[in-house]
């Protein structure tokens, strides 16, 4: 355990205790025990507050950033949007590289990947690389708007993680450094690719594989009054309100809720105006968000090591 100097508006120059070395030993071990890492993360006294903060942050990003809204409302497009950054960090973005990665991960067909490439270019997520070393394979770069949007998203997520590990602010405030950004994206993308290939899933998978599903779950899980997060008590529920907020059809929301009820993950009140999360879904959401934090923490460690900074 060491100390780190936190810079920025909050606590400028303040030294805090850093557990990054301890976390590195856990997260980069050849025989990584995910259950142990998750339990350690969840045991932190600030964990419950931090996962509610990142859920709120995710909802606020969807409301205020048009580019992220376009990505978040289509889960496959969100993956491709992130993985073009990953491909750039790994080497180069080409049509062939996007098709190969989509095929490897199994979340889009080759035809779908081609259509996504066209859409990403038309929507301004990708631009042509001004340097084209091989005419047979056209190269692309993330657009400045894409880099800014994801940088803001990563920075916000790390600020939510900071109450658990304050030293991640050393990365959060430097997302405009290409070395930090690319190392962060490469680590995060590698972890995400491993998770997709493993096929691991829990109750949250019902939501994160549907358009706007995760945002809908975060909204439903928000506590009312003095309740805890994820909400234990019934929360007000309206299909029309959720469809309007997340720009999906009422039929889409209705089917999502019915599927969740059929699996015993939540239930509606008799009058249909409130939803209650069942304990298996509450625990699955907690585990899911712990895994997200672990991914961000691993990426922050990789970013600091990429620029040769002590943990």
Image (tube, rainbow, N blue to C red):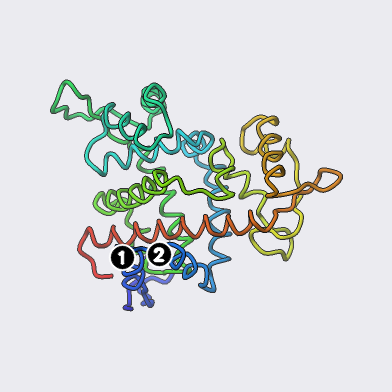
The crowding category of the residue bearing disc 2, from other C-alpha atoms within 10 Å (few below 14, some 14 to 19, many at least 20), is few
Residue 290's spot in the image, x, y percent? 49, 60
Residue 140's spot in the image, x, y percent? 26, 30
Instruction: Give the residue displayed 39% in from the left and 28% down from the top.
Output: 120
At numbered mark 2, what does the secondary structure look like: helix, strand or loop?
A: loop
Q: Residue furthest left?
A: 133
Is the Cβ of the residue at disc 1 closer than 8 Å to that at disc 2? yes
Q: What residue sits right under mark 2 in the picture?
A: 33
Residue 16's spot in the image, x, y percent? 38, 76
Image quarter in which the C terminus is found? bottom left
User: Where 274 falls versus 283 (above or below)?
Assistant: above
Q: What residue sits right under mark 1 in the picture?
A: 29
At numbered mark 1, what does the secondary structure look like: helix, strand or loop?
A: loop
Quarter of image, res 45? bottom right
Identify which residue, 95 or 12, lies in the foreground: 95
User: Where 54 falls versus 89 (above or below)?
Assistant: below
User: Where 8 falls versus 288 (above or below)?
Assistant: below
Total labels: the figure holds 2
Left or right: where 41 falls relative to 126: right
Instruction: Give the residue displayed 16% in from the left and 30% down from the top.
Output: 131
């Amino acid at each position: 355990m060491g100390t780190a100097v936190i810079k920025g508006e909050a606590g400028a120059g303040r030294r805090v205790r850093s557990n990054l070395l301890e976390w590195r030993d856990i997260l980069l071990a050849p025989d990584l025990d995910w259950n142990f890492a998750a339990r350690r993360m969840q045991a932190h006294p600030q964990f419950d507050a931090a996962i509610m903060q990142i859920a709120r942050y995710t909802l606020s990003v969807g409301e205020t950033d048009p580019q992220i809204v376009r990505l978040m409302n289509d889960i496959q497009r969100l993956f491709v949007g992130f993985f073009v950054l990953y491909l750039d960090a790994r080497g180069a973005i080409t049509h062939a590289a996007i098709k190969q990665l989509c095929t490897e991960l199994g979340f889009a067909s080759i035809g779908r990947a081609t259509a996504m490439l066209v859409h990403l270019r038309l929507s301004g997520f990708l631009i042509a690389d001004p340097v084209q070393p091989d005419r047979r394979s056209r190269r692309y770069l993330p657009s400045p708007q894409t880099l800014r949007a994801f940088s803001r998203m990563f920075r916000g997520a790390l600020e939510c993680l900071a109450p658990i590990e304050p030293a991640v602010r050393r990365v959060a405030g430097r997302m405009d450094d290409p070395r930090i950004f690319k190392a962060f994206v490469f680590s995060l993308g590698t972890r995400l690719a491993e998770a997709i290939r493993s096929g691991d899933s829990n109750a949250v998978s019902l939501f994160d594989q549907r358009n706007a599903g995760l945002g809908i779950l975060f909204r439903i899980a928000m506590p009312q009054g003095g309740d805890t997060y994820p909400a234990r008590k019934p929360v007000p529920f309206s299909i029309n309100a959720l469809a309007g907020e997340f720009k999906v059809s009422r039929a889409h929301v209705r089917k999502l809720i019915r599927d969740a009820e059929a699996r015993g993950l939540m239930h509606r009140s008799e009058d249909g105006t409130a939803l209650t999360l069942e304990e298996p879904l509450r625990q699955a959401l907690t585990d899911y968000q712990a895994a997200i934090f672990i991914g961000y923490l691993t990426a922050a460690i990789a970013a600091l090591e990429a620029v040769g900074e002590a943990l």
